[in-house]
Amino acid sequence: MVLAALPMFVIVVLVGVLISISFQSGIIGTSDAHFTLSNYVDLFTDPIIGEALYNTVIFAITATLVSMAIGLPIAWLTERTTMRAKSAVYAIMTLGLLIPGIYTAMGWTFLAHARIGFLNRWATQFFSLSEAPINIATPIGMGFVQGLSLAALAFILTAQMFRAMNPSLEEAAKIHGLGFIGTMRRITLPLAMPAILAAVIYIVVIGIATFDVPAIIGLANRVYMISTYVFEKANPGDEEFSQHGITAALGVIMIGVALLLTWWYSTVLRQGDKYQVVTGKGYRPTLIDIGHWGKAAWTFIILYIIAAKVIPLILIGYAAFVPYLAPPSAKMFSLMSFEGLIENMDWDLVLRGLKNTVLLVLIVPAATLVLAFSISWLIVRSRSKARYVLEFGAFLPHALPEVILAVAAILMALFVLKDFVPLYGTVTLIAIVYVITRISFATRAINSALLQIHKELEEAAHVSGLSEIRTSWRILVPLLRPTLMSVWIWSAILVYRELTVAVFLVGHENITLPAVIWSYWQSGATNLAAGVTLIMTLVLTPLVLLFWWFGRKSVMSN
């Protein structure tokens, strides 16, 4: 029970620290600090916050529209039509979900940034233009890039809905003379609307809190989002302690908005039964014969893959081996050199980042599994009323933006625990936040798997004299092994590719590999940033393939 309650305790402490500091002025943690509402007043009177809020709304809406415009049709094509090679589509979309947003952001920066973008430099040269025709460093441009990254998530969130949809109403509509468009407009889309709306809300929540794409593309151009505004205000390197109160106040507001959107998301999911999308009968929705349109469908999918994955990876590879960033040409290809990248790279920094990242990959998934299993067992198997509190606590990190949890961890380490437990600048602090942010997914996955195991097996073990711990180890763990392994690998991948928390919490000694990329990117060393990204890709690829091979169905079905 104590072990299961630990994540919730940490969350309560983090949120409590955030709320407390949001109402303090002066130098936090000293006698000069006193209660005030000035942080909230300063926040709402800051002209930048208004701009950041507007940009965030446009960014989140654009990202949602783009991701749904790509993911939803692919989900429908995969589940409701006779399109061929559907397993390949699932593999592509699942693997795409695991590719960090930083890849897509860097690639499209090289391609379409107003100042350094290759397309713009070609256009201004050949057409004698005074201004760049394309500028990706805008809320809409960044939203487009984010949408490309989240299209795979939109696919995952909507594919299962189409798979389970009751075909009877569609078949009745066809009998009464409704054509394809009429059936889609009056039957299919209304039936799918709860799942679509839930996916939209979920992606909007991600868009509001996302950091990597706005930071990579927009921060250098002073195009602020809420997340990048928080980053600049909370950056402990400037030692402007007065900014932490404003950051904490913004964090409290973001938590409120995130909780509201999450409640809306849960409400939409609970009300989905009104639409009778799923019944208890066994059936398979009637597949629509798309005939020669199958080639058009695959063309659409291939174009998405090229835009979201292939082009960014090619441009990152190109940028890594050129001495300076310039559009591809015969001259630039002749200057490409592997030796130059090797000589200019700070290998001590890279290896330290890799070491810390590997350490986190080993520690965080293991700790997440132990805590999530304990929580899930109490939620599913225990009759204690405390299980409802634990269930809420396990879901809570899902509703809290990672950027805010990182800020709360900074404030706790700097002002609350610095004289007792020196956590700031350590791998331990990063690991704690990582475990908290992964616990919701892990618990939900294990909950679903545990519900499928009948209690009779455990009761028989108890009759034979096994304790609860030995029963769990000898009965439940072997039966749950596919789910546990999938959760472990998934958590490891998310830890390995994570940038948001790392950027806020890393120092010289606890730097991670994504933070190394960010450090090089901020300093303008784009070739070195691209080079580390390639190294990261080489290490990430086996993990991604292992996840897809071993347990993608088990995780994604939950």
Image (cartoon, rainbow, N blue to C red):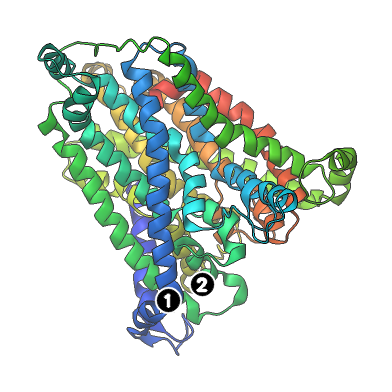
Assign a secondary structure to mark 1.
Answer: helix
> In this rendering, would 16 be left or right of 179?
right
Between 123 and 306, the one lying in front of the other is 123
Q: Among all residues in the image, which is located at the extreme front?
A: 127
> In this rendering, would 495 be left or right of 187?
right
Between 384 and 249, the one lying in front of the other is 249
Q: Residue at x 27, y 40 (%)?
A: 198
* Residue type, mark 2 in image: Lys
Assign a secondary structure to mark 2.
Answer: helix
Q: CA distance from mark 1 to mark 2?
A: 8 Å
Question: Is residue 3 at least partly visible in the picture?
Answer: no
Q: Which mark is residue 162?
A: none
Q: Residue at x 56, y 23 (%)?
A: 546
Residue located beneath label 2 in the image: 233
Q: Residue at x 41, y 85 (%)?
A: 25
Residue located beneath label 1 in the image: 246
Q: Earlier in the sequence, mark 1 or mark 2?
A: 2
User: In what quadrant of the picture does the N terminus appear?
Assistant: top left
Q: Is residue 307 above or below residue 353?
A: above
User: In what quadrant of the picture does the C terminus appear?
Assistant: top left
